[in-house]
Image (tube, helix red, strand yellow):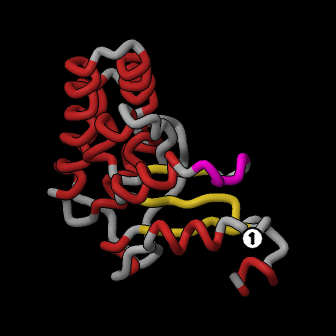
Amino acid sequence: NEIANRADKPVYLYDLAVVTKAATAPATVKKLWKNPNIKGIKSGNLVTQRILHRAEDRPADFTMMFSNIDEFDIAYNYGIDKNLDGMFACTPKTARKLYDALDAGDMATAGKLLDDILALRDLFLATPCLMMAFSHAMNLLGCEGNFAQDYNRDIPEADKERVTAAMKALGEI
């Protein structure tokens, strides 16, 4: 709360226990969202998202972003329809089709499309550096730059070829 009070920009809560090592309880979020400078939360916890999504006292300008891509299709069925995950950034065409399938209630197609995105993520994980594999995918889309930490080394050419082939198979390039 004190950070939000002192910040000259909107503040967003970050609830990703795998990174922070501590989950943010819904009751804590409900206390914090009373601060007008706290504008949202990124959380990968489906239960937290469901509780907050249903809360009648949630401020209208409080944005909830889901960040557990593995369960996004399930979350969407609860009305949790905003995500913040890099895999959607590097698969914009597939993500659009996924959203369209979810909007149409076509869970079979949505599940297949999400599995396709997850397969690309798993390919990234199989390289020496997930974020350099992501960078290569983003570069293929015309988004130049290195999206990894500056100390990371590039992935081998063979991994770049696999990422390129996967991006082509998805229809992203």
Q: Is residue 59 magenta?
A: yes
Vertical relation: 67 (above or below) 23: above
Determine the residue positioned at 32% across, 47% down. 69
Tell me where residue 104 sits by quadrant: top left
Query: Residue lying farthest bottom?
Result: 2
Q: Where residue 28 appears, x then y in whole percent? A: 53, 74
Kind of residue at disc 1? Asn
Determine the residue positioned at 50% across, 59% down. 42
Query: Residue lying farthest right?
Result: 8
Q: Is residue 138 left or right of residue 28?
A: left
On the question of residue 155 being in view, the answer is yes
Vertical relation: 119 (above or below) 11: above
- Disc 1 element: loop
Q: Where residue 166 appears, x then y in whole percent? A: 23, 33
Q: Is residue 69 magenta?
A: no
Residue beneath disc 1? 35
Vertical relation: 156 (above or below) 32: above
Q: Where residue 81 appears, x then y in whole percent? A: 48, 36
Q: Nearer the viewer, residue 151 or 41?
A: 41
Q: Where residue 100 appears, x then y in whole percent? A: 42, 17
Task: Report the span colored magenta.
Answer: 56-60
